[in-house]
Amino acid sequence: MKLALHGASGRMGAAVLSLARTNTAGSFEIVGAAAERGCAAIGRDLGEIHGMAPVGVAVQDDIASALLGAEVVIDFSHRRAVPVLAKVAAREKIAIVSGTTGLDAAGLEALDEAAKTVPVLWAPNMSLGIQVLAELVQHAVRRLGAGFDVEIVEVHHRNKADAPSGTAARLAREVEQVRGELRKVGGREGMVGARTAEEMGVLAVRGGDVVGDHTVHLLGNGERLELTHRATSRELFARGALFAARAIVSRPAGRYTLADILRD
């Protein structure tokens, strides 16, 4: 499968490249790599900028040139770059797998427009385990009902800029689909009084080099259930993106989710 990388100079670009070159990922050929204009990687070999053997592909700042010959593009870039990528990929009939986080309305609209022409999968967390966790959370909340309090705790490395994580917010939305009466609480301090039945704590912990832990606590009388996912390597996000690329490349145009491809 002919693959291009968008946001190729970043850590996830390195992770996708490393995994794509192994036999365990399946058969992928890297045919293009794009990074933002002004990046120090422009013009250099994709493998060399990540401390790997050369791959014979130079990093470019022209997206159209970088996508030339690709069947699918994997995107881990910045939200500002997604609209242009979506427009070019749709024009060139190239499937899109995007793991770029924090997309605004313009980015989401651009992906919707591209999906009229090519298959598009966007997931702010490419972990297959997180997708299954989200499904389990909905099931557990529905089965346990209002008698169980819900709290979500996420842990990430000290350099993460946003809080709570996008994945924690996604898990909260899964809970809210079942229990729409709940309101999110970002923290508690001082004499806040007893916890109300309508609260759902969504709490962030920061420190060290933690890739990402997410736990949904379901707390009842005399018992509790804790559903946890722990990420120990960024490779898992690259593995999910490559799995998604292989799954959607030959599908009809449209928007897809990780749930869609796991169902198969």
Image (tube, helix red, strand yellow):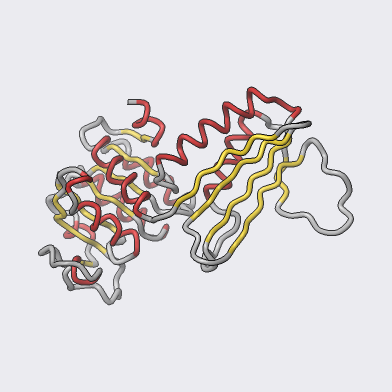
Q: Looking at the image, which is closer to me, 264 or 104?
A: 264
- Say if 220 sits above or below 2 in the image: above
Q: Looking at the image, which is closer to me, 240 or 33?
A: 240
Number of marks in the image?
Answer: 0
Where is the C terminus found, in terms of image quarters? top left
Coordinates of residue 49 in the picture (x, y in percent): 23, 71
Q: Looking at the image, which is closer to me, 77 or 196?
A: 196
- Say if 191 sits above or below 141 in the image: below
Coordinates of residue 36 in the picture (x, y in percent): 31, 67
Q: Locate residue 161: give its quadrant.
A: bottom right
Left or right position of 151 against 18: right
- Residue appearing at x 73%, y 36% in the figure: 149
- Residue appearing at x 59%, y 52% in the figure: 154
Left or right position of 218 against 233: right
Residue lying furthest front in this view? 222
Residue lying furthest left in this view? 56
- Say if 34 sits above or below 130 in the image: below
- Residue appearing at x 61%, y 31% in the figure: 177
Coordinates of residue 189 in the picture (x, y in percent): 81, 58
Coordinates of residue 132 in the picture (x, y in percent): 46, 34
- Say if 142 sits above or below 114 in the image: above
- Residue appearing at x 59%, y 63% in the figure: 206
Where is the N terminus found, in terms of image quarters? top left
